[in-house]
Amino acid sequence: MTFETNNRVLKILPDDVREAVAEKCERVELEGGTVLARAGERTNTVHFPESCVISTLQTYSDGSIIEMGNIGCEACSGVNLTLGYADQLNTNEIQVAGAALEMPAESFTTLKEAHRDFERALFSNVQAVFYQIMVSGGCNGAHDSKQRLARWLLTMNDRNDGETMHLTHEFLAQILGLRRATVTNAASDLQQAGLIEYSRGRVTISDHEGLRQASCECYDLVRKAYESILPEPG
């Protein structure tokens, strides 16, 4: 029986390679807030998200934490291992609870060296993740808080199967590197425009196309990049 997963990095592999990779994976359920790996520590496992979302976080000397990027079912962690570096440069934390395929770092490296198709898929993943981070950096400098919030909500909605998201203003401010009051005002504007429903930390997108118009072009840039670099099979 062919191994099935909705993780795009694994879906693009030939059946025999995907089966070899799957043999070294364990499907796990991960709770929000779970730290998978801390900056400066050895990477022990790699995760291929299926329904969870991983945040790549940077902590600064003043204690502030900002999201550098995020990884959902279109990608995987282990960028440092793909490039031959054993230690974490950033902290990986579960942002949205859900399922993932977990693989020991040693197996990851062995399979990468043994299967050229797997190695190619992993380097495509590196390219896509790096592009996302570069676009996010440009977005933070070029676009206003409402556009950035709209982009982030659209991205999370894509990875959350359109379900209600549990997000507080404090969390959004931390992730986006904004003041809490700024996030509150931006969310209020989006809600008054009928684009989202937000109550007691629960966010639902009520007008996807309208929110897309309120966002900046960065949302579509990253989405199209993933579709081009890691195209869905078939």
Image (tube, rainbow, N blue to C red):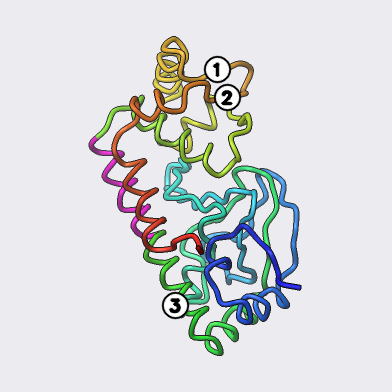
Q: CA distance from mark 2 to mark 1?
A: 6 Å
Question: For numbered disc 2, what is the local secondary structure?
Answer: strand
Direction top: furthest residue: 192
Q: Which residue is mark 2?
A: 203
**Residue contact between numbered discs 2 and 1, judged by CB atoms under 8 Å:** yes
Q: Amino acid at mark 1?
A: Glu
Q: Secondary structure at mark 3?
A: helix
177 magenta-colored:
no
Is 132 in the magenta? yes
Q: For this rendering, which residue is in front, 62 or 16?
A: 16
Magenta residues, as a range? 130-142
| Residue 229 higher or lower than 96, as above or below | below
Q: Nearer the viewer, mark 3 or mark 2?
A: 3
Distance in Å between CA atoms under marks 3 and 1? 41 Å
Q: Which residue is mark 1?
A: 197
Q: Tag 3: Cα neighbours inside 10 Å, few (<14), some, or many (≥20)?
A: some
Q: Tell me: residue 221, above or below residue 43.
A: above
Q: Calculate the distance from the C-alpha at mark 3 to the C-alpha at mark 2.
A: 37 Å
Left or right position of 12 against 152: right
Q: Residues within 10 Å of mark 1 (few under 14, many from 20)?
A: some
